């Protein structure tokens, strides 16, 4: 199966099993906007909780916040979003399709990288045991030629983006011979800038109403509350403020399902530090955030760092943690050293002092900020896509299973009576009543036991408990493991303890301390 087909299957599965629906589905959907169904919302809430607990609960010096989506319009002037939150867009005159100029160039670079990878595969075949990949990449003329092209295109693109050189960007697209994927022609318009913020009106009358924006990031709500939290919480630097919430961007190139949405959620943490110490903390959070991802157990090879060549106007260092989605390695989380840019600008635009008084040195200063910013929906997609498996079993049957990390699974347990009589449903209900105090559980008595297991595999339920006739005799049940499909006979009294060890988030969070 190609990666494209696999991705289509994942999207169809997400709809069929109540994870994700297109928004306003009965009206044929709304571009790049999605709703989370009964299982989706559980998975999403579990991701939020795991992120929140790993920061706000595990650190004395990190605290939470929930700021409003609407903010004073001056916030976005101060932050630079009104003047600089733009994408460079280019249209193909024949297909009338619109693209982000930098995305066209990134896709072109990805194709060159693909060529290099093919050369490496050929080399491996040719030299077999004697193959030394590092040496091959450093010396093979075809690889070196493509690499030189990549460096040159990337260098020119970064320079044009940094210099705001729209004509330079267009020329680079022309020079690379990039064709529109739809029309196949190279008939391009000029490159233009397009602001990504949604605006609306606050107030009842047209005349008196003021234009405001839907926030394009949650971070600014943290910056404008920096002193409120610091003073009311008596926080000492270094300290962090974490927030989870909706963000809105009028994305032009909206594609790849929930990867790039117009309404999405971010989980952001701004860590306020003493000026001069930002690089130490940047490195700390770069390491810690990767550890958080790895703690989920989706596979070390699924993540990589990408250090930014082009730094945003506010940053002095930045990197992404990329994830191997079915459509390739793409950004999942950003870690940015944002200097004192945001707080200084808010001081300037609000006329209020946003300084920290350090009681140890008797100095006041504007703190520097290291930000960790992760997309909740992208994390959801990373978990969903890495967990999805179409498996052929030993008896030749097939199953679709979501091997979701148990701590995140939407439903943790299902309880089944083997059959719908002989008092088995009553016992199953008793077990359910006790276990649902600790975990999100489901009860199911319809269809054969095999079909019930398949339904639970398809939504990623890690454990199924079956009550059978032996239960009535010795108060034991079978406990089935989703991944191994093995069934253990265990005492009803021991269920709570066994399941706690497998499902309690403390056994996952302890990997982070
Ligand atoms: N405060 C910094 C900030 O917003 P960003 O790199 O623009 O930085 C951070 O966004 C994260 O938010 C990204 O790494 C990504 O996971 C997520 N994100 C950004 N735009 C998104 C979109 N249109 N749809 C879904 N997630 C998005």
Image (cartoon, helix red, strand yellow):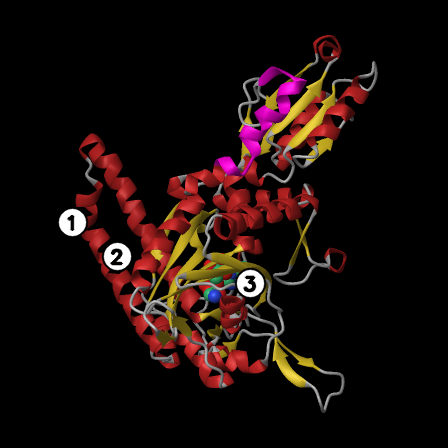
Residue 210 higher or lower than 177, as above or below: below
| Other-residue count near label 3 (Cα within 10 Å), few / some / many at <14 / 14–19 / ≥20 | some
Residue at 48% x, 48% y is 58
Q: Nearer the viewer, mark 3 or mark 2?
A: 3
Choose the circle earlier in sequence order: 2 or 1. Answer: 1
Report the front residue among 415 and 277. 277
Q: Disc 3 and disc 2: Cα gap in Å?
A: 29 Å
The residue labelled by disc 1 is 139
Q: Is residue 449 visible?
A: yes
Comparing 84 with 242, the one in front is: 242
Toward the top, the furthest residue is: 473
The residue at the point 37 percent across, 75 percent down is 365
Judge left or right: residue 395 versus residue 139.
right
Q: Which residue is mark 3?
A: 254
Residue 506 included in the magenta stretch of the image: yes
Q: Secondary structure at mark 3?
A: loop
* N-term-proximal mark, 1 vs 3: 1
| Pointer 3 with pointer 2, Cβ within 8 A | no
Determine which of the numbered discs, if any, sits on residue 169 in the image: none
Residue beneath disc 2: 146
User: What secondary structure prevails in the magenta region?
Assistant: helix
Residue 350 relative to residue 288: left or right: right
Which comes sooner in the sequence, label 3 or label 2? 2
**For the magenta stretch, what is the residue range?**
487-507
Instruction: Check mark 3 vs ligand 1: CB closer than 8 Å? yes or no.
Output: yes
Report x, y in % for residue 121.
29, 41
Ligand 1 within 8 angstroms of badge 1 C-beta: no
Residue 466: within the magenta?
A: no
């Amino acid at each position: 199966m190609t990666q494209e087909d696999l991705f289509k299957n994942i999207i169809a599965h997400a709809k069929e099993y109540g994870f994700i629906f297109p928004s306003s589905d009965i009206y044929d959907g709304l571009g790049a906007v999605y709703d989370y169904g009964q299982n989706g919302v559980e998975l999403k809430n579990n991701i939020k909780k795991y992120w929140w607990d790993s920061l706000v609960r595990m650190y004395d010096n990190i605290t939470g916040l929930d700021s409003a989506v609407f903010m004073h319009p001056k916030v976005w002037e101060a932050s630079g979003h009104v003047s600089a939150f733009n994408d460079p867009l280019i249209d193909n005159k024949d297909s009338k399709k619109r693209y982000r100029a930098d995305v066209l160039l990134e896709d072109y670079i990805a194709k060159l990288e693909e060529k290099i990878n093919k050369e490496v595969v050929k080399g491996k075949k040719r030299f077999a045991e004697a193959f030394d990949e590092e040496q091959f990449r450093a010396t093979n003329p075809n690889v070196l030629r493509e690499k030189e092209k990549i460096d040159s295109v990337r260098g020119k693109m970064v320079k044009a983006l940094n210099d705001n050189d729209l004509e330079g960007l267009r020329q680079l697209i022309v020079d690379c011979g990039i064709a529109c994927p739809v029309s196949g022609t190279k008939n391009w318009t000029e490159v233009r800038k397009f602001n990504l913020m949604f605006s609306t009106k606050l107030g009842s009358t047209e005349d008196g109403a003021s234009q405001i924006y839907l926030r394009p990031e949650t971070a600014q709500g943290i910056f404008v509350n920096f002193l409120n939290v610091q003073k009311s919480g008596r926080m000492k630097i270094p300290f962090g403020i974490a927030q989870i919430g909706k963000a809105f961007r009028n994305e032009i190139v909206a594609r790849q399902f929930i990867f790039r949405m117009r309404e999405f959620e971010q989980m952001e943490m701004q860590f306020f530090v003493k000026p001069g110490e930002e690089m130490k903390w940047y490195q700390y959070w770069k390491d810690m955030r990767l550890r958080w991802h790895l703690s989920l157990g989706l596979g070390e090879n699924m993540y990589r760092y990408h250090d930014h060549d082009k730094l945003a106007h506010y940053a002095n260092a930045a990197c992404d943690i990329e994830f191997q989605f079915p459509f390739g390695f793409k950004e999942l989380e950003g870690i940015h050293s944002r200097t004192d840019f945001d707080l200084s600008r808010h001081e300037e635009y609000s006329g209020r002092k946003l300084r920290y008084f350090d009681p140890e040195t008797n100095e006041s200063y504007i703190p520097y900020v290291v930000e960790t910013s992760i997309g909740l929906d992208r994390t959801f997609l990373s978990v969903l896509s890495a967990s999805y498996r179409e498996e052929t079993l030993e008896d030749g049957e097939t199953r679709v299973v979501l091997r979701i990390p148990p701590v995140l699974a939407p439903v943790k347990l299902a309880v089944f009576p083997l059959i719908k009589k002989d008092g088995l449903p009553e016992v199953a209900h008793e077990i359910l009543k006790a276990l649902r105090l600790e975990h999100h559980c489901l009860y199911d008595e319809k269809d054969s036991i095999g079909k019930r297991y398949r339904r639970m595999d398809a939504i990623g339920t890690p454990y199924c408990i079956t009550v059978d006739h032996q239960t009535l005799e010795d108060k034991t049940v079978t406990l089935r493991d989703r991944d191994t499909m093995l069934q253990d006979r265990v005492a009803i009294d021991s269920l709570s303890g066994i399941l706690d060890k497998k499902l309690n988030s403390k056994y996952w969070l302890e990997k982070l301390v």
